[in-house]
Amino acid sequence: MGWQEIKNAFLVFTGWQGLAILGLTLLMALIGNWKWKEILRGENVKISFRELFKPYLAGFAVMFLAPILLLGGEFFRGYVLKKNNSIPWSKGMASVFIDRILEWTANLVVIFFGVLFFLLIIGLPSMKLL
């Protein structure tokens, strides 16, 4: 894949489509950060939304830019919480893993209903396979 293919992929979107994608991505990050803040609040950890957003985005970047590092973004988020906010490692990492479990649970629910919807639209396969 060369630079021309990357350029062509971006040219497919109009300005409004690009803004919509950017807006939805930002909304996803804000909701994810809010979810993580609530998890930490449940562990009696007080941290501002803004202060928590920094390790959230940094962990997100590590996860996407270095996907070979299995759970690298999660460990990075826990490390930054401990280093910058003096949050105990155990509480920080527990909150990160609870956040990921909740995220994957939601993903599995969406996948389940997507497959169900798909099967209802195309019809269920016949029981006679032979």
Image (cartoon, rainbow, N blue to C red):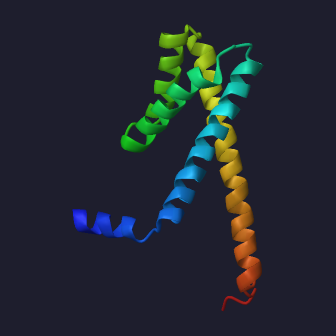
Corner quadrant of residue 44: top right
Q: Quadrant of residue 20?
A: bottom right
Q: Position of residue 121 (x, y in %)?
A: 74, 82
Residue at 24%, 68% (x, y): give it: 4
- Frontmost residue, 37 versus 90: 37
On screen, residue 1 versus residue 20, left or right, reads left
> In the image, 123: left or right of 103?
right
The location of residue 92, given as percent across then percent down, is: 59, 19
On screen, 76 above or below 113?
above
**Res 64 seen here:** yes
Residue sitting farthest toward the top: 86
User: On the rendered image, what quadrant is the C terminus found in?
Assistant: bottom right
Residue at image location 69% in from the left, 13% down from the top:
46
> Residue at the location (68% across, 88% down)?
129
In the rendered structure, the answer to whether residue 112 lies left or right of residue 54 reads right
Residue 113, given in percent of the width and then of the height, sits at 74, 64
Q: Quadrant of the N terminus?
A: bottom left
* Looking at the image, residue 17 lies above or below residue 70: below
Question: What residue is shown at x 51% (from left), y 26% (from top)?
Answer: 54
User: 27 and 119: which one is in front?
Assistant: 27
Q: In the figure, is residue 50 to the left or right of 45? A: left
Instruction: State the image quarter where residue 31 is shown.
Output: top right
Q: Is residue 124 visible?
A: no
Count the marks: how many? 0
Q: Position of residue 51 (x, y in %)?
A: 57, 20
